Amino acid sequence: MLDADIKAQLAQYLEMMEGDVLLKVSVGEDKVSREMASLVDELATMSSRIKVEMVDLERTPSFSVNRIGEDTGITFAGIPLGHEFTSLVLALLQVSGRAPKVDEKVIEQVKNIEGEFHFESYISLSCQNCPEVVQALNVMSVLNPNITHTMIDGAVFKEEVESKNILAVPTVYLNGEPFSSGRKSLEEILAEMGSGPDASELADKDPFDVLVVGGGPAGASAAIYAARKGIRTGIVADRFGGQILDTAAIENFISVNRTEGPKLAASLEEHVKDYNIDVMNLQTAKRLEKKDLIEIELENGAVLKSKSVILSTGARWRNVGVPGEAEFRNKGVAYCPHCDGPLFEGKDVAVIGGGNSGIEAAIDLAGIVNKVTVLEFASELKADSVLQERLYSLPNVTVHKNVQTKEITGTDSVNGITYIERDSGEEKHIELAGVFVQIGLVPNTDWLGDAVERNKFGEILVDKRGATNVPGVFAAGDCTDSAYKQIIISMGSGATASLSAFDYLVRN
């Protein structure tokens, strides 16, 4: 199951195990069972600390990772390779006794959770967002004996996934009931369980010199540049990493041939933590007001104060805004083809959007699903010519241009899409199982109201120094009227805004 390069890497990790681990394995005669047995056997031959026992578990094929003499609570129903290989490695290390790399406050929160909690996460091995959820729930199982977690590969347990009408990953069930969907950090899961950080801790903070609102590439860059000046710096973010957490392959970040969004986000966070920066994660800003100091009010009611502020709140996927989109989100309406595409294997889907992201999505999906229909509002596709050539070479793709989406239809989940031909006004309907929305971005600036000047698209207007129309308030990244929305441009604009904020502090 493991090639030579992976085995070499794995061998180094397994040397870090601190105690013995028992793998309890439940397999049958099917292909996945044989592959799982092969993987487990390979693991056992690579470390004398790994023991194997054949048992009957709730699902077959599956295997659990346990301390000797106990059921630790971590189970893999499926083969954790692909994006989940790291989840397997970490489970082996952490169950063996190696401490998870988690903040001590978070560890205490997990240990103090009372009650029985049995989590099940439905994932696909091609999903770059799933491992964070799997690893977070595994950590909780390691730290608290009352918590268990089973990772379930939707491609292996198709009947179970279909019976629960799961059309998006990761989807998490808690004690048999739906709990959450989408990427979640350990802190976010704890917050949903009612065990998040105390808001009173934020309200009592001293004023900052520079407060960065937003934790994506622009915000991380701005905070690092500010902290290097030796001034009191803070970041408040509802999700550290921002948009790039939902980005699969990144191939235009100069000096790095290829990386993935979650990996880059982790590197950003690690770099930020090298400096004396107060990171306040899982906090959403709701109001900005300029007084003697600039005040940022959070959704939880806490008010943070700072001498200068850098807005780097980024952007989010733009919604089509038609009936059925909100109702069937994660029930056939999806925004990430890499994550959710495998759940539509052999089915018909549509992609709304003819730009680069839409056409890339259609190309990726064409290799998985039965048929892809692309719907583009304009009279021509906007994607790069090389992508269009690839798209038109695919036999299972149909393109409709100059059409307007009217409605996404369904009952419990999506069953079709209705569109209007803009030339003739004729209305048409296509029966399908999924709709992937890829029509660009909208800035996360609604909360600002009239506090700073924005254009008709909601983008914050800035000058060449990143300054807004409010003295002491700067902005950077995809929330601004920058000509292009790119990671490397956001980082540069974050640095510019930070240097400008420092100059403002010096002069004022």
Image: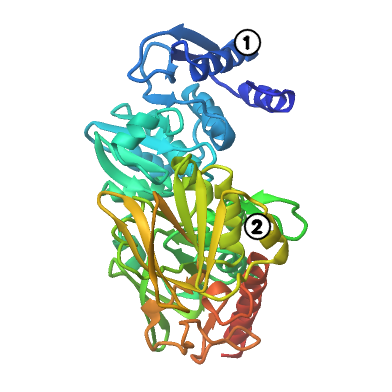
Tell me which colouring the rendered structure shows.
rainbow
Q: Nearer the viewer, residue 275 or 358?
A: 358
Marks 2 and 1 sit apart, C-alpha to C-alpha, by 48 Å
Q: Nearer the viewer, residue 394 or 227?
A: 394
- Taking the image as shown, residue 453 lies to the left or right of residue 163, namely right
Disc 2: which residue: 392
- Relative image position of residue 159 (x, y in whole percent): 35, 30
Label 1: few (<14), some (14–19) or many (≥20) C-alpha neighbours in 10 Å: few
Quadrant showing the N terminus = top right
Residue 280 appears in the rendering = yes
- Relative image position of residue 138 (x, y in whole percent): 42, 33
Find the residue positioned furthest to the right.
255
Kindly identify which numbered label has been placed on residue 384: none
- Taking the image as shown, residue 361 lies to the left or right of residue 290, namely right
Name the amino acid, label 2.
Tyr
Secondary structure under tag 2 reads helix
Residue plotted at (61% across, 49% down): 395
- Taking the image as shown, residue 409 lies to the left or right of residue 51, namely left
Residue plotted at (58% across, 67% down): 223
Query: Looking at the rendering, which quadrant does residue 480 occupy?
Result: bottom right
Q: Relative to 286, say whether 283 is above or below.
A: above
Sequence-wise, the earlier of marks 2 and 1 is: 1
Quadrant showing the C terminus = bottom right
Name the amino acid, label 1.
Thr
Disc 1: which residue: 45
Find the residue positioned furthest to the left.
115
Find the residue positioned furthest to the top.
54
- Relative image position of residue 478 (x, y in whole percent): 55, 73
Residue 269 appears in the rendering = no
- Relative image position of residue 91 (x, y in whole percent): 49, 28
Secondary structure under tag 1 reads helix
